[in-house]
Amino acid sequence: MDEVIKVDKLTKTYGNLLAVDNVSLSVKRGTVFGLLGANGAGKSTTIECILGTKQADKGQVSILGYNPQKDRRKLFQKVGVQFQECDYQPEIKVSELCEETACLYKTPADWRELCSQFGIGNKTKTAVKSLSGGERQRLFIVLALIPNPEVVFLDELTTGLDAKTRRDVWKILSDLKKKGLSIFLTSHFMDEVEVLCDEICILKKGKVVFYGTVEESKVVSGSNNFEDAYLILSGEEVDGA
Amino acid sequence: MKSFLTLFKNELKLNIRNMNMVIFAVIMPLIVLLILGFLNGIRPAADGVNYTFMEQSFGALCTISICAGGLMGLPLVVSEYRERKILKRFQVTPVRPIKLLAVELSIYIIYCLVSMLTLIPVAMIFWKVTIHGSWLAFLGSWLLTMISTLSIGMMVGGIAKNSRSASVIASLLYFPMLIFSGTTLPFEVMPEGLQRIVIVFPITQGIQLMKATFLGLAVDNAVLPFIVMGTITMLCTGISIKYFRWE
């Protein structure tokens, strides 16, 4: 299996704050990689440095063999991204946003089909601002999948979704993974991480404190429950425990 | 090209839905035309000249939409897209920045064109406005004025820190140019001191050139407007592409 994402000794500071501290990771083709950590642990900054939307101070990044900043236009033909904070033109409709996204790619997926797969097929004529939070979240996952990507980045993918919809989204992503899609995600839901992720990396104050599989994390932390394992490893609960 | 057209179609729809430019770039020039028309009718611009006041003002009326688009619409839309992180979403797609700028630019060109195409028949039918010079020269001057003003807007939108500062800069450029460059208030009625100041506005140069070409007057110093507007276009376009920021 070849590496689709390779990050080597990535470091990023904001003033005095060390946001990302010497992070190295690698994601293999057709796997799901989860980047975990508390709010402010440096997940989003790490993603942005990997994507090249933020300039890292140090370190090397390659996605599908491309340098994200130098080869931006080639890379993003094959990579889909859902940012945590997405915004859209104030009056835009779902269909217009999808169409506007699809037109940028050489071989886009059928966005109508994606919308109905994600349960918003009947909302295409609606203004994006009138969608519910969950519908909007699903729309942004759709937008990330429109490129027919080889790699997709999903930052907090199921935040705001109800239990049933979360399961539906997991199912779709698992199917896409079987077809060879590589997924890089962040999430605060450990059930989701346990179901989806082949490998995880836990960040604390910008540093990698755990790197391995979900099962390994349980062994290392001496806990049967993954959420407990996560809390112990991320140091959110261990202080004094 | 296909992606340009799709973006253009969608962005134009969004822009029309917003209505601001429909009002300021299409309806407002018509209203000014009607007011000037009812006030002045078909009287000559001055004693002993063979053109009317309305003919003298026609070029200026065509620049109201140029001002609105270039100094209000374009800078605000570019800076708003950056501030709302819409450009950031485009940053992680294969689109070129210059394509996005070109799409927005084209939308404002359309407004300017629509405005002129509505002014011409109204002025011709109601106040018998006819061109004394040459259409070709007039359209050339119009094009130069429009491109130079829109390029200012692109630069302001490109380098403003956020949409608030873009809006402040836009107003600082828009209102003085709209009022004092001869767009709404004829240049000729301004005191000489003021005329000397506003002559440096590119749009003043544009209006003078459009007026001369419309009325068929001899342009005694045609080189100056060309130099002013050409320099501004190249400078502003260069800056807005070089300093383009997604975020």
Image (spheres, helix red, strand yellow):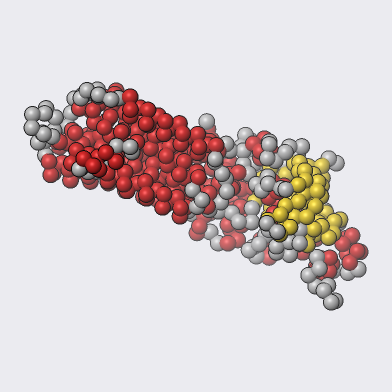
Residue A137 visible (yes or no): yes
Q: Position of residue B66 (x, y in %)?
A: 34, 39
Residue A57 relative to residue A201: left or right: left
Residue displayed at 45% across by 50% down = B166
Residue displayed at 83% across by 60% down = A209
Image quarter for residue A220?
Answer: bottom right
Residue displayed at 15% across by 41% down = B37
Looking at the image, residue A234 lies above or below residue B179 = below
Looking at the image, residue B244 lies above or below residue A22 = above
Q: Position of residue B3 (x, y in %)?
A: 54, 35
Q: Nearer the viewer, residue B104 or A129?
A: B104
Q: Nearer the viewer, residue B64 or A3?
A: B64
Q: Position of residue A149 (x, y in %)?
A: 69, 42
> Where does the C terminus of chain A fall, quadrant-wise?
bottom right
**Residue projecting furthest to the front:** B193
Q: How many marks?
A: 0
Residue A179 relative to residue A219: left or right: left
Residue displayed at 76% across by 51% down = A11
Q: Position of residue A136 (x, y in %)?
A: 58, 57
Q: Nearer the viewer, residue B185 or A147?
A: B185
Residue B30 visible (yes or no): no
Image quarter for residue B185?
Answer: top left
Looking at the image, residue A82 lies above or below residue B113 = below
Q: Nearer the viewer, residue A36 or A235?
A: A235
Residue B110 relative to residue B190: left or right: right
> Where does the N terminus of chain A fall, quadrant-wise?
top right
**Residue projecting furthest to the left:** B47
